Structures are given as C-alpha cells and as structure tokens.
Amino acid sequence: MIGSATGGKQKQIAREEASGLVKWSRNNRRAITSTLFLIVMLIGFAMANPAVFSQFKTYRSVMIALPVSIFLVVPLVFVVTAGEIDLSFPSVVGLASYAFVSIVDQGGDPLIGIAAALLVGAFLGFLNGILVVRIGLSALVATLGMNFFLRGLINILVEGFSIAIPEIRGSFIHTLLTDDTIMIVENQGIPNQMLWALAFTALGVFLYNRHSFGVRVHCVGDNPESAAEMGIDVDRTRILVFVFTGIGAALAGVFSVMINFVWWPTTGDGLLLPVLAGLFVGGTPTWGGIGTVFGGAIGTSIVAFIETGVIAAGLTGFFTQFFYGLIIILSLIFQRFNGGRVR
Amino acid sequence: MKNDYIIELQDVTKSFGNVNAVDGISFGVRPGEVVGLIGDNGAGKSTLIKILSGVHQPDSGQIIVRGREVRNWSAAKSRESGIETVYQDRALAPQQTITRNIFMGREIKDRFGIIKVKKQYEEANRLMREIGFTSKVFDPDSPVATLSGGERQGVAIARALYFDADLIVLDEPTTALSLVETAKVFGFIENVRARGRSIIFIGHNIYHVFDVADRFVVLDRGKVVMTEDKAKIPVAEVLIKHMQEIAELGHATEASSA
C-alpha cells in the first residue's frame, strides 16, 4: 500500500510499506557488507593472480580448515550479542578434542568419542557461564583465565605428547564428516566438513533470528534490565550462550582432529585471533544486542582467504600479518557505515 | 475477607541493606478499578511496583492472585497471572524491532520455541494501528530507537493491550510526554476501565492521578498511610493538602478509611 495525501480528514493514513527487497537489505545490511567485502577481496586476488584463483583447488585448500573456525564463530556471535565475550574457546577445543582422541586411540567408537567431546565442551561452557553470571566475574578476564588454566591442564595431562589416530581413516564416521562428496573437478570436491559447517551456520541463523532463544539473546544483550522486567531469565540465557560456545568448540575440535589425524597439545591454540577477527569483520559489533551469524561465517572466510591470497599474489609470507591487519581495519571501516550504537 | 481482589499483597516487606523500602504493605486491586498510587520520592512506589511485577521478590508477606497465594513470585509468573507493567523506563530494547519489543519475553511460538514471525508481525501491525501509529517512516520491523518518547510509550502500552491484561500497572506514564500524548494515555486508561480491567496508576502529578483514579493509596516511607475513595475527596487540592500533612507529620489528620 502506498500512502498518499488523499481526502482531508482521513485519520488512518496507510503506512508506506517498504518493498520486500529494500526491507531485506535494510535488515541484513551488516551481513551484506561483509559478503560484498569478501567478493571484492576475491576479485582483487584473482586479478593479482588469475592462474591460481581460477583453479578449484585453491578454494578447496581454504575449505579444508575453514569449517573449524565456522563451528566457533557461530556460537560466538550469540555470546557477543548477549553482551559477553568468551576467550577460552581455543583451550576448550583442545580439551574436548582430547576427550575424543583418547577414546578413539583406545579403540573406542568414534561416535562415543564425539559424545564425550560434546559433553566436555558443554560442561566447560557451563563452567564459564557460572564464573561470569553467577559469581559475577568479568567475562573478558574470567574466560582468558580459563584459556590459560585449561591449556595448562592439557599440558599436565599429556606432558607434551601428541596423539595420532590414523586408524580413523576409512571409518564410516570419518567418511561422513570429512570426505569429498560433491565433486567439482576430477578427484576433488567440496570437503564434507564444509557442508557440515554450512549446515551448522544455517542452524545458527535460524536459532538466532527465528527461535525464542536467539531472540532473547538479542534482548538480553540490548538491555538486560528490560529483559528481566519482561520476564526473561537473563542469567539462564547468558549461561546458555557459554554452553553453546562450548559445544561449538567441541565440534571444532573433533573436526580439527579428523582433518589432521593428529591431536596436538596445542590444538586450537592458533584460533583465538583469526576467529575473533572473523566475528567482528563479519559485522557483529562489540556492544551487544545485534549481530549476524551469516556475517560471522563470511568474516572467517575473509580471514581464511587472506593468507592464500597474499601468497598467491606473489608476496612473501612476511606480508601475511600486514594484510591481516589491513583487511580487518578496512572491513571494520566499511561496517561503520552501517551505523553506531542506537539507544 | 475480600475475595474479589485480582491481586492482593498482605504485609509485604522488602529491604535493601538497612533501608526498609517496603515496610509491611497490604493492599489489593478490584476488577475494573483504577488505583492511584501516590507518594513522595523514596516512599516506596517503585519497589512496590517491582514487587507486583515480579522483578523483586518480597522478603516476607504474601502475594495472593485471585484468592490463591502464589509462591516463588517472578516476572514471568506476574505476566502469566495477567499483570502487565508499563515501566517508567518503558522496558524496551532499543536496537530491536517494534515487533520484538512487543513480544519480548512472551513470543508467539510453537512448542519447539520457533517463533511465528509472520503472526507476530501482523499482530504488531494491528496493535500499532490501534494505538494510532500512522507515521510512514516506521513499520513493525523498525528498531525502537527510531521512535519518539511518546511512540516508545505506545509500544510499551501495546504489549499490555495485546496480552489483554487483567491488571495494568502504569509507572509514571505521563512523564516526559507532550499534552497530546498524555491525552492519549488517558484515553487508553478509560478504554481499559470500560472493558472491566484494572489499572494501578503511579504518578508525581497529583492532578493527573486525581483525574483518572477511583481510589487513592498514599505511601510514605514504605507504609500505606492513607487509602481513600475518590467520592470522599471533592477536588485535587484536598488530596494535595493531605499529601502535605503526610510529608510533615507522617500521617493524615483526618481518619483514613482502610
């Protein structure tokens, strides 16, 4: 309906409904910004080195490890939207995947290993939630402490030894999770873990926007007093986002070990900064109340392509960090055009 | 025994540290009446409201809903009991859409928790029209941050309207509103009363309270110091005189009916 200045004393003026596309882009502008940024970046890389970026294997090489970051970034969007932060996930990845690898290494069923990893992850997330929500510690400091504490625990447990599980290759669960099913070129397809990560992202998007849990996470992060006044259990919602991150970290850990066939005492360690960078590059602001799960997945993809792109463009590895920084700052400047915090 | 109360508080107390914010208050609200709750700053109005709405749990005393005592009182239970509170700060999440704010804490969802987005949108659209939102610049998907103070008040009231509450608590609803917006709030109150619902109206402006209330409850230092039907008070000035006496003496001079 288009509201026009018809007949003088008409009280009810029909509101001008924005068209579907306009509305959609208004509601998703942060994710759209990061997606455009990824596309422009890839075009830039492709122009710098058309030979490399016209080959499927370039993209495939990124898609092998990218899913690990996606399993982390999806729940982290919930955490940041709720107005919290979790810096303990690298060590949760390590400890949860240690549970998985120990069981498989001793001949246990990989499915039981996955269940154990999920339990460990959920429990550690719950522990983070208790520290932050019930005991009232700062999320930033408490989860940073947990990151050191859990990594320390891993070191004490294994005394520096890694665990290899080559026997998992060829097992049903390994094929299901990490083989190539959708073939693109001869012998090379999209790694299954990428499909699982996409499914996880889709689930996250749905939970974030269409489920009462996600909607309550938005309200709690936006204005916790109002949320409590409207009968939302603010503490429970906050604890649950930490549990969700623990579960995501466990999945990330399991996939990481499945991909590499080895668990190291350092598994997960290198993920802290790239995943957080991907989260913010993707369009989720730091202040809570809003964010984008899809954008988070795109953001981690941007970060994942930087290294490949820099090397393919003919620059030495010394340039990688420089471009990390440059691209993160550039993309945040673009996100800035989507507005600051409104009150 | 007055069993016709929608909600009744019996000897309710609440203290914060050494401060007895609510110090043994008993009062109830009958169907279809508008209770004006007045008192100076620090009299305990806000605490009492937050007890009614379940944000605070009382330290002692009973909360009786339709003749039955409710234990483990909470904000969710208060809303389930048919009490909607329009808070002074509107209790809004400004970055969220109008729709999300209307259904905050009580979304329209299926048993798996999946929100019926379309239904919520349509209901929000209907409610916005009902309370007279005719602006072209926003729709149910617009963030509340884009609205004026009066429009935000409208969103908070739309909630109470949608859930068809038996008792609506309006905490300082006319503060910071324009004359036109204040008139709208009064119209809303009349509307609610006409439908047989009850209202607790909290206000600083005695004239506003006097205009709309059927009965006045005056608080001072955490206690009910006066309860009077409007029929026994001819003009607002009399009520103001009572208030001044209470402020000076701690009680009203004329006998107050309880």
Image: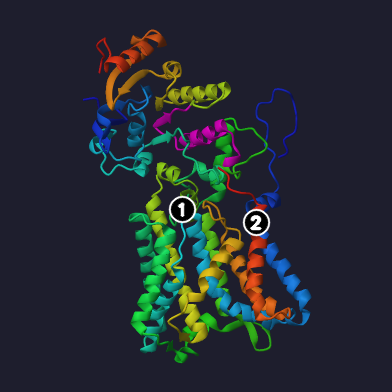
The total number of labels drawn is: 2
What's under tag 1, amino acid-wise?
A: Asp
Label 1 CA crowd tier, 10 Å (few <14, some 14–19, many 20+):
few
Chain letter of disc 1 in the image:
B
* Residue visible at 48% across and 76% down in the picture: A268
**Element assignment for label 1:** loop
Q: Percent x, y for residue A4? A: 75, 33
Q: Nearer the viewer, residue B43 or B6?
A: B43
Q: Is residue B161 magenta?
A: yes
Chain letter of the residue beneath label 2 in the structure image: A
Residue A239 visible in the snapshot:
yes
Q: Is residue A7 rendered to the left or right of residue A66?
A: right
Residue A248, percent across and down?
47, 69
**The N terminus of chain A lies in quadrant:** top right
Q: Is residue B4 visible?
A: no
Check disc 2 and report the residue beneath it.
Answer: A335
Q: Can you tell which quarter of the image residue A96 is in?
A: bottom left
Examine the structure image and report whether residue B195 is included in the region drawn in magenta: no
Q: Secondary structure at mark 2?
A: helix
The reply, left or right, for residue B237 in relation to residue B133 is left
Residue annotated with mark 1: B110
Q: Amino acid at mark 2?
A: Gln
Location of the C terminus of chain A (image quadrant): top right
Give the quarter of the image for residue A143.
bottom left
- Placement of B1 over or under A303, stated as above or below: above
